[in-house]
Image: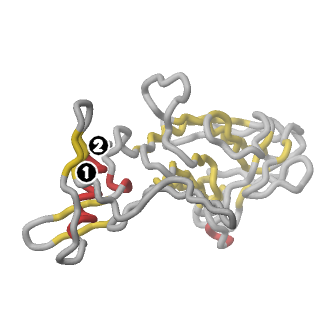
Amino acid sequence: MKKILVLALFISSLFLPQGALAQSKVVSPNYEIQFPNFNAGAGVPKSTNFWTSGTLGQTAAGLFSSTNFRVKSGFQYIKTIIPFSFSISNISVSFGTLTPGTPETRTATLTVKAGGAGGYSVKAQENHSLQIVGSATYIPNTSCDSGTCTKTQAQLWTLNSTYGFGFNMTGDDVPSDFVNSNYFRPFANAAASEDPAVVMAKTQVTWDYPNNTWPWESQATITYKVNVSGTQPAGTYTNIVKFTAIPAF
């Protein structure tokens, strides 16, 4: 943090007009501050008619470069100790042979490490419904027991008479509509021009606070579920679900 402050203040001083005066160093037996002329201030200025609070900010944050140098000034350039990464434990899921009225489920673990101050999000989208390749025969996406679940709103799916394909999320940073493991959504469908939907998100670093245990990551389990009726045509049904992990700074 000290290096960042010194760098930020030094860059600010480069933009002082010629002839401006600034004390170069403040020293005591216990501390030394370089470039103390902030050209900004913090505190609680007040009078009879007003009261304000102020904080110190940078006057020259950004990327500065020329032929011979590059300076990255500002907190957005702090080197994170948690590099961004995303992984899925199982990228090929097979439900095997389906029995009408008997739901099948499969799971995978999504792991995210994000050190950016803004956190991250993970979005999901299928290319189309589960479909027999080269035909128009498909297994519809679930609408849950109530018939009202959507790509952004999970609902209960416990009845064996409810058919379709959907997913549930449990674990870290999952949307609140996944109340428990019986709440499902259909995937956003690219073939129906639906935008990807968020399945994990956090607005800060993936830090296990207050336990502070390593690794600093978020993990969630996705459960895929499919159930077919007795009139569903036989065949091999496939689709592709795309997950997009996005860091925020």
Quadrant assignment, res 39 = bottom left
The furthest residue to the left: 68
Q: CA distance from mark 1 to mark 2?
A: 6 Å
Residue to which mark 1 is pinned: 6
Q: Residue at x 25, y 51 (%)?
A: 6
* Residue 86 percent location from the top left of the image: 44, 44
Q: Nearer the viewer, residue 90 or 72?
A: 72
Q: Left of 26 or right of it: where is 211?
A: right
Amino acid type, residue under disc 1 in the picture: Val
Q: Which mark is residue 2?
A: 2
Q: Residue at x 58, y 55 (%)?
A: 123
Q: Residue at x 36, y 67 (%)?
A: 59
**Image marks 1 and 2: residues in contact by CB distance under 8 Å:** yes
The furthest residue to the front: 48
Quadrant assignment, res 226 = top right
* Residue 180 percent location from the top left of the image: 78, 34
Q: Left of 149 or right of it: where is 211?
A: left
Q: Nearer the viewer, residue 182 or 180?
A: 180
**SS assignment at label 2:** helix
Say whether residue 126 is visible. yes
* Residue 66 percent location from the top left of the image: 14, 73
Q: Left of 249 or right of it: where is 147?
A: right
Q: Badge 1 local density, few (<14 within 10 Å), some, or many (20+)? A: some
